[in-house]
Image (cartoon, rainbow, N blue to C red):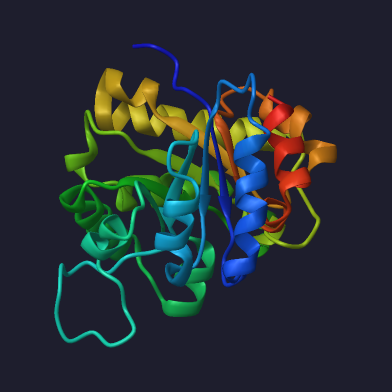
Amino acid sequence: MTAPTPLIAGNWKMNGVAASLAEAKAVAAGLDGVTARVALCPSATLIAQMAWTLKDTAVAVGGQDCRVEASGAFTGDVAAEQVKDAGASLVILGHSERRAGYGETDALVSAKAQAALRAGLEPIVCVGETLEQRKAGEALAVVTGQVRGSLPAELVGKAFSVAYEPVWAIGTGLTPTIPEIEEVHLAIRATLVEQFGEAGKSVAILYGGSVKPSNAAEILHADEVGGALVGGASLKADDFLGIIRAL
């Protein structure tokens, strides 16, 4: 199996309006010489506009979530097919903000990953422990358990990635040490190989949690780190490009 191509994905969360697309255009314009895959994941309201803005560029567009069902009476929700139809090619699933704020379980994230595959979307499945779990020495057990529970067997041979985001590092400015990141990423890799065999070696494992230009190089060159899922720093082209170029 060949090594996975690095992926740098920006999660805009609930930020951005049409005027913000200028930042997306600036990212696309600054990718000369970049070999990593690059994606931006805006709110659902911006997916179609961003996809149009970034057509014929090297930047892919992703969604931030999807519903399991393909259609139905689910006011305010968005189906995977609708995310795809709006112009996205990827979708973030199981982010800790969804798990904590909406009670999303591993089983639900797994079902959403199956929905994403049904619609032709590439899932980015998020896992990560809380500060309390890390302090209790449970980080590896929690994360590998989430990997096993959140990745359906249907993913074998399909394009997808896993994003390790320690919950306590998201938006806090705190980051684990490089040895701590490597320990978790190595455990995720072992779990992927356990689940998917040789195909598990070609899955990109992204790191997320307060990634910024000043720490990106060190993180991105750590063992088994195959890219990054970037939050706030992806809202500004200069910051996001600084992270991308750190590869």
- In depth, the one of 159 and 184 nearer the eye is 159
Q: Can see residue 64? A: no
Q: In this view, which residue lies farthest toward the right?
A: 214
Going by the image, does 51 lie left or right of 156?
right
Q: Quadrant of residue 76?
A: bottom left
Q: Residue at x 16, y 51 (%)?
A: 118
The percent position of residue 245, horizontal first and vertical second, equals 72, 28
Q: Quadrant of residue 219?
A: top right
Q: Relative to residue 175, is residue 130 depicted above or below?
A: below
Report the quarter where the C terminus lies.
top right
- In depth, the one of 153 and 59 nearer the eye is 59
Q: Can see residue 219? A: yes
Going by the image, does 175 lie left or right of 63?
right
Q: Relative to residue 245, is residue 67 depicted above or below?
A: below
- In depth, the one of 230 and 61 nearer the eye is 61
The percent position of residue 176, horizontal first and vertical second, equals 74, 44
Q: Residue at x 36, y 32 (%)?
A: 192
Q: Residue at x 65, y 42 (%)?
A: 27
Going by the image, does 36 lie left or right of 150?
right
Report the quarter where the N terminus lies.
top left
Going by the image, does 185 lie left or right of 246?
left
- In depth, the one of 148 and 80 nearer the eye is 80
The percent position of residue 155, horizontal first and vertical second, equals 23, 39
Q: Quadrant of residue 8?
A: top right
